[in-house]
Every structure is written in structure tokens, then in C-alpha cells.
Amino acid sequence: MILVTGATGNISGHVIRQLAEKGVKVRAFVRDAKKGAGLKGSNVEVVLGDLGKPETLEKAMAGCEKLFLLTVASANMAEQEMNALKAAKKCGLKHIVKLSAFGAATEHKSLLAKAQGYCEVNVRKIGVPYTIIRPHAYMSNFLMFAGSIKSQGAFYAPMKQGKIAAVDPADIAAVAVGVLTGKGHSSKAYNITGPEALSYGEYAEKLSAAVGKAIKYVDVPAADAKKAMLGMGMSEWLAQGLIDLYDDWANNKADKVTDVVKEVGGKDPTSFDEWAQQNAAAFK
């Protein structure tokens, strides 16, 4: 039995489906019973709990051997993850697969990458076999631009000409499933990317081809991008963390491409052209 946290989210949802398809028993950890109801099915059971409430974690882990640990980005994510790590240690789990982030490091200027760096330190110290997976920006993040693309034929970000190799969430899940069901991954960390590094202008061209209308990328100052994020209801902590990541990306400090999806996930990585075709309706 594998416990999967963040079960109603994008990545964990793919992990649950892919594990269930392989015949692996999964326990989906959710905070909202209504949202979790749709996850129930063959090989999948749902348990209520909260990473912020340690007493719910041990109950959820009873009978489990492994944990896929995904924590929603927030200022208290390290504390929440530590609750899960302590419970995993106490319950005798045999392996933890922790979802981190590309570039995570305790010395990173981005609060988001820094927090993930400290979470990585914690998972290494807890005394349970672990694997860390660090995905780059998700291709699905472009869905956040759907509103302006539909209304203005454009999307805005402080990326300049920087390139990143965005990755399909389903491919991230394939790597996680490969680790959870395979061998030889203990004490390793995998950087996960898509198959090619592209500028936002190039992503715009590919979206244009998939959607069938001209879509342009407009570079904006970081301050304006942050103001827009806050206007969408994003927290100051997360908005500033993302702006600092954008600064790295804009200066090509995160333009590397890896073969992890193929080598660990056992599949060819999804190209952005393929992802854009699959999701074109969202931008029309």
C-alpha cells in the first residue's frame, strides 16, 4: 500500500491513476471528503487527514509501506512535511518519495526554492530510505495564462529570452511511479525536465499552432508580474518566491534538459507541441 498526499492535486492525481493502473494499492490522503470522493476506485481508497494535524497522519499510514509526499507550496510547508516524515519514521515506512522542485537549495534566493531545500535536508535526516524528485516548471502552468490568451491573444511574464524545459505533469508522475515500483532509487535525487528548453516566445509559437490563432508572449517587469500575482489572490510569500525563480529562468540559469523521464519513468517525454494539442480547447 502506498500513501499519496496532495491527492486531489494535479501531480498526485496522475500518480494515483498510474499506480492503480499497474495494480498497486493506493491510499489517497485528502482534506476534503467531497473532492476526494472521485478518487475512489479499483485499487484506490481515500482517507481524510491534514499534514498540519500530525494525529491524522499515523492513522493514514497504518498498513502502508511507502509514501509519495507532496506538500502545497506555503510558508509552513517544511513544518507540514516534517509532520509526515516523523509519522513515516514511527510507522516504519520503507521508502519516501518526496516531490521537490528544480533548483531547490537552502541557499537559493527564492523563498519557494529555499523552503524545498530545507525539506530535502529533513527527508535525508529522518532515517527512512528516500528518493527526491525535482520537476522543472509544469507545462500545465501555461493554463494560468488562458484568460489573457482567450481575451487578448497574449500572455505576460518577466522571462525575457530565457529558456526552460517545462515538463508534462503526467511525465512527472511517471517518474514517481517508476521510483515507487522500481528498485535502485534509494538516496537519489532526480531532476525532471521536458525534452527541450524553449523561450516563452517559442512556447507562444507552439501554442499558436495548436490553438489555431496568433498568440504572443509579452515581456513585463518583475514588479508588474508580482502585482498581477497578488491581484489573483496569491500570497506575498509565494508571489515573491515565483518572481525570484523567474529571475533565474530569465537569465538561463535553469535551461538544462535531462533524460530522467525516459530513464526512470520508462517513457518518451511529452513534447510541448503534444501537450498544447491535448489542451488547445482551454485557450480557445
Image (cartoon, grey):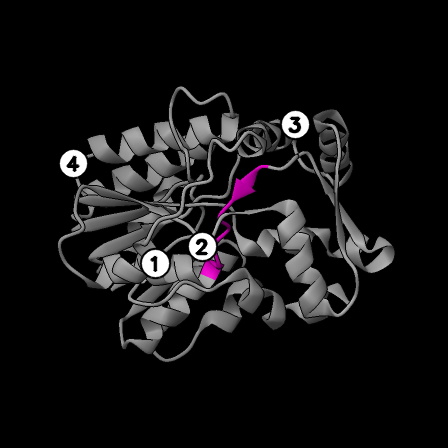
Label number found at residue 194? 2
User: Along the polypeptide, which appears first: circle 2 or circle 3?
Assistant: 2
User: Along the polypeptide, which appears first: circle 1 or circle 2?
Assistant: 2
Magenta part of the chain = 162-169
Say above or below: 106 vs 13.
above
Identify the residue under disc 1: 261
Q: Do the residues labelled 2 and 4 touch (CB within 8 Å)?
A: no
Element under disc 3: helix
Q: Which of 47 and 187 is in front in this view?
A: 187
Distance, label 2 to label 3, CA atoms, is: 29 Å
Amino acid at pointer 4 = Gly
Q: Position of residue 165 (x, y in %)?
A: 48, 48
User: Along the polypeptide, which appears first: circle 1 or circle 3?
Assistant: 3
Question: In this orientation, does residue 46 appear?
Answer: no
Q: Which residue is drawn at 37% across and 38% down?
A: 81
Element under disc 2: loop
Amino acid at pointer 2 = Gly
Identify the residue under disc 3: 236
User: Along the polypeptide, which appears first: circle 2 or circle 4?
Assistant: 4
Q: Residue at x 21, y 60 (%)?
A: 63
Amino acid at pointer 1 = Val
Q: Are marks 1 and 4 in contact (CB under 8 Å)?
A: no
Q: Is residue 82 left or right of residue 194?
A: left
Closer to the eye: label 4 or 3: 3
Closer to the eye: label 2 or 4: 2
Element under disc 4: loop
Amino acid at pointer 3 = Glu
